[in-house]
Amino acid sequence: MLKSLTGLLAGISLLLSVNSMAESNLIAMKTDLGTFVIEVYPKSAPATVKNFLTYVDSKFYDGTIFHRVVPGFVVQGGGMTFDFTEKPTADPVVNESINGLPNDYKSVAMARQSDPDSATAQFYINLKNNTGLNATGTKPGYTVFGKVVAGMDVIEKISQEPRGMFKAHPEAPNYAVRVLSATRTDSAGVQAIINAQRATKPSSIKDALVPIDENQQ
């Protein structure tokens, strides 16, 4: 009886944990250069966040690349595979750029065409305060829906990648920087990511040296 009760409680705990993760507003994006975490703001941009999380939960972003890197401006991705094939998307989402969230450093926003309501899957991270991308009283801007809350150094690394190898995509890194996975996480998961990326890796220089006498072998 006690064993059955213990098993039942463990099952309920696991179910609650899964449900909590499914409702999380923290997204861990693992890339070739490390992992960064986005916190999304559903109260400020409900339609945009729902759209973004639908792509996350369906694994749409897994395998996409950061195809547009403009140092001092933005890092953009979420729509193309390594060979610059654009992935088919769902219908565009309504523009929510008048939500009061500015295109400031570390903020995450939706990329779009000239039509304000044309954003689908592609997003970008601001590398500085880009006030020119904000909505004004006379024109819509680019919808900010979240912020990088951990791993901004990874975004900065991406922004420093050499570019120019591809004539058709001159702002793409010469060697693809992929989103390996995009998954919901929680505060404990964020802390684990931070700790892992702060950990100092042991140097392998001794292994790389050619021994010059037996004492060094």
Image (spheres, rainbow, N blue to C red):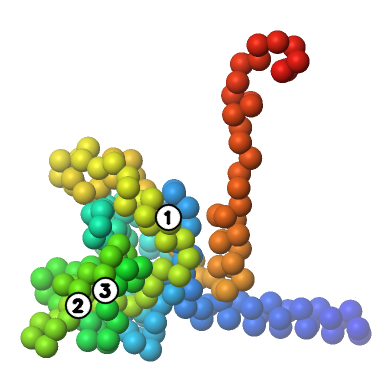
Residue 104 percent location from the top left of the image: 29, 72
> How far apart, in angstroms, are the residues tagged by discs 2 and 1?
25 Å
The quadrant where residue 72 appears: bottom left
- The extreme right residue here reads 1
Q: Residue at x 50, y 70 (%)?
A: 184
* Disc number for residue 154: 1
- The extreme top residue here reads 213
Q: Residue at x 22, y 69 (%)?
A: 130
Q: Sequence order check: which comes first, mark 1 or mark 3?
A: 3
Number of numbered discs visible in the structure rendering: 3
> How far apart, in angstroms, are the residues tagged by discs 1 and 3?
19 Å
Q: Sequence order check: which comes first, mark 3 or mark 2?
A: 3
Q: Residues within 10 Å of mark 1 (few under 14, many from 20)?
A: some
The quadrant where residue 208 appears: top right
Q: Tell me if 169 is positioned left or right of 49 in this view.
A: left
Image marks 3 and 2: residues in contact by CB distance under 8 Å:
yes
Residue 85 percent location from the top left of the image: 25, 51
Q: Amino acid at mark 2?
A: Asn
Q: Quadrant of the N terminus?
A: bottom right
Q: Residue at x 73, y 17 (%)?
A: 217
* Disc number for residue 198: none
